[in-house]
Image (tube, grey):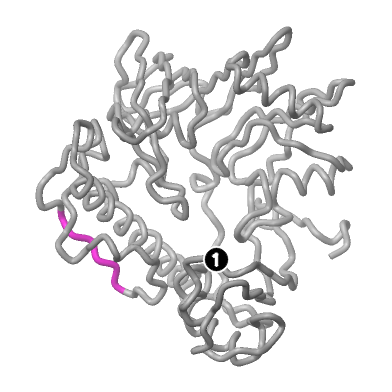
Amino acid sequence: LQDCEIFYTEDGLQRIKPYYHQFATYAKGRWVGRSVFDVFTKEFRDRNTEYYEKAIESGLIELNGNKVDKDTIVRNGDLVTHYIHRHEPPVSTQPLGIIRETEDGLLVIDKPGSIPVHPSGRYSYNTVLRILEIKHGYKSLYPVNRLDRLTSGLMLIGLNADMARRLKTNMVEHTIQKEYVCKVIGEFPLGRIICEQPIRVVAHKLALNCVDPEKGKPSLTEFVRLCTDGKYSILYCRPKTGRTHQIRVHLQFLGFPIANDPLYNNKEVWGNDLGKDGTLPATPDQYNDNDLAVNLTLQKPVFDPALRPTKMAGKCDEECNNHAWTGVIKRMEDWQAKQDVVRQVNCNSDGPRMCDVCANPSMPDPTLDQLCIWLHAWRYSGPGWTFKTPLPDWAKGV
């Protein structure tokens, strides 16, 4: 693609014209000994099994530059390539706000929700780094703080390696103060509320994190209610540590998840208590600790009511801990698979639109409330400097 041809706007969203792209990676340890078909259908869930059958037959998927069949076994050291017609998801048309560029190489921006920072997964051009490169002419970019795709707000980006190192040192030494605002469900209590629950990763692939008093890393977030209407509350948040999803996980633990958070405010995954105090629904019998692979062929996801609550905030032996989280992981996989099916079926009244080039079903556009979560990085302060963004509309009252 030529730079001038990459971005276009349609129906209120920034889009990328579909293009051909080759993914190449060496076989991961968990792929070794499995068939090519099994690896692609269970590891890469953005396409269905029929697509992968045709891709293998037509030579779009190769090992070490050679054509394969469905039963070819992946071996250690194999180079796996996949030549695809890539459809990037659309993102918000809200521009990246340039707040400040300093002479010594610091770029401060206001990131809209829906735009990921780095090229990853289905996103390449519709990312902060590529937009800054193509639309604004920046060449060397070193992100210092990385916001989730759905989170909006202030980002610090070094324009040279030295600036990035200095800022990351400040982060490690806790000399940079981070301040956020968010909108949660319920009437959050008055006063200064501090959550010090340790946090750990539950499943890297699902970007799922949790409170774990025994295995989690030390984490601390301070919350202050700014206003409430009884149904929602606007909070001021100060994370003192920088764990992944820290604010979101701590708010879930306190019983006040971010109101439109699809991950941590999801009863189909966490049960009616939404993970408050670390309480999880019991793991149904059909889930076991080995049943964690994503099932792309799932047409009727299983959603079972909680059998009995399992309290995870206190001590729990290893077997209990693993079994409880197996259920959460599987319910999250089932929920995501269900969303994929629902989105394809609901593309239009006649069913999903099919791409004329690759015959892959086109996903419908995200709705406005799916472009962001109500969490915004508002102000960062360091030695001798402070930068802040305007508040988003949802944070100006309830």
Q: Percent x, y for residue 133?
A: 83, 45
| 217 left or right of 230 in image | right
Q: Is residue 247 left or right of residue 189?
A: right
Looking at the image, can residue 222 be seen?
Answer: yes
The kind of residue on which mark 1 rests is Lys
Magenta stretch encompasses residue 220: no
Q: Quadrant of the C terminus?
A: top left
The location of residue 323, given as percent across then percent down, is: 22, 53
Q: Can you say whether 362 is above or below 72 in the image? A: above
Left or right of residue 277: residue 245 = right
Residue 302 colored magenta? yes
Question: Which residue position is annotated with label 1?
Answer: 28
The crowd level at tag 1 (other Cα within 10 Å; few <14, some 14-19, many 20+) is some
Q: Is residue 5 above or below residue 246?
A: below
Residue nearest the viewer, comparing 287 with 376: 287
Please name the predominant secondary structure of the magenta segment in the image.
loop
For this rendering, which residue is in front, 165 or 13?
A: 165
Position above or below: 373 against 52: above
Most foreground residue, 113 or 304: 304
At 62% across and 75% down in the image, what residue appears? 78
Image quadrant where residue 230 sits: top left
